[in-house]
Image (cartoon, rainbow, N blue to C red):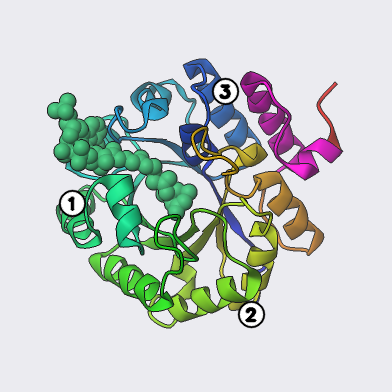
Amino acid sequence: MRAKQISLFEVGARDGLQNERAVPLEAKIALINALAEAGVKRIETGSFVSPKWVPQMADSQAVFAGITRHTGVRYSALTPNMQGLAGAIDARADEVAVFASASEAFSQRNINCSIEESIERFIPLIDKAKQLNLPVRGYVSCTLGCPYEGEIAVSEVVRVSEILYKLGVYEISLGDTIGIGTPDKARNMLKAVAEKVPVEQLALHFHDTRGQALANILACLDTGVSTIDTSVAGLGGCPYAKGASGNLASEDLVYMLHGMGIETGIDLLKLAHAGHEISRVLGRPSGSKVALALGKPE
Ligand code: HMG
Ligand code: MG
């Protein structure tokens, strides 16, 4: 049964900006504040990862310190290990997220360790977060394919998701990291995971590299999934990987959901304006078709 209400988990300031050329601190803070003003309730605000690996996120501590916190909004941080958790605690993040992969090769390239080693690292992190009443989200990458291994077995996606779930992660976000999936494949993957993890605790995180993300999400809605990760203005896309692109644009999802009578609590025009502004800083048009159709503010 389709959810009547969908919760957007906005990843533009993290997943998007980690893959764009560096933007000034003030622009990041303005973006996050504008997203909250638009009614977005869950905002991934930064990541506490090695600045050598992802220099674009090196100022996450300052971003958390600079934002105006809105009541009812949860500001989250990506944390790969205990050092990252310490950073998130200092920053007063409302929740943290660990990230694992369904692909061994991607795990090595992304976090320099095997899937099993990454899970070993998450155990003390989740324990400590629990002591502090800090909710922990979990990502599983490469659920519909891997840039290094190609096809990924659905059984592997289910296995890693179930491990994270049993460790106490409150929500598992299923990533089509390279936007390679198509609708039937996406729905089948989600249904398989939902046999082991309640669908209420699953989220979709589809990159739009091949223009399939909206169709893939639509194909999944009948499962009852009610959390979707998106990136305002479709921010993202790796400067080093030709053709790579960001998550589905938040504006495009909101437009579709509202058109279907599904509530998000988000003001589409304000959201689109937030996207236009950060796109201006990046020196290019918004990556959202809906935002382009709505036009820029006068
Ligand atoms: P490593 O080199 O194996 O780590 O990296 P290490 O423990 O051996 O430490 C090496 C150095 O890194 C040390 O510094 C540590 O202090 C430092 P040095 O002594 O050389 O000066 N270090 C840290 N610094 C800051 N914060 C930390 C931290 N940890 C160690 N938390 C590590 C392992 C995980 C740190 C590294 O591989 C890394 O930072 N990777 C980040 C990768 C990343 O951020 N990828 C993008 C996010 S994932 C994603 O986008 C996918 C997702 O969107 C879902 C999807 O689309 O599928 C979530
Ligand atoms: Mg991602």
Indicate which disc, 2 or 3, sits on the residue closer to the N terminus: 2
With respect to residue 127, does 293 lie above or below? above
Give the amino acid type for the residue marked by disc 1 in the picture.
Answer: Gln
Q: CA distance from mark 3 to mark 1?
A: 32 Å
Q: Is mark 1 within 8 Å of ligand 1?
A: no
Q: In x, y percent, where is residue 123?
A: 17, 57
Name the residue beneath numbered marker 2. 1
Q: Which residues are magenta?
A: 267-293
Of callouts 2 and 1, which one flags the residue occurring earlier in the amino acid sequence? 2
Identify residue for label 1. 131
Q: Within the image, what quadrant is residue 293 found in? A: top right
Residue 252, position as x, y percentages in the image? 73, 49
Assess whether residue 281 is covered by the magenta stretch: yes
Give the image location of residue 25, x and y in percent.
Answer: 47, 18
Looking at the image, which residue sits at the far bottom? 195
Give the amino acid at mark 2.
Met
Image quadrant assignment for residue 210: bottom right
Can the viewer see residue 84 in this picture?
Answer: no
Examine the rendered structure and indicate whether residue 17 appears above or below residue 59.
Answer: below
- Please tell me whether mark 2 sits on a helix, a strand or a loop: loop
Amino acid type for the residue under numbered disc 3:
Ala
Mark 3 vs 1, N-terminal side: 3
Residue behind mark 3: 30
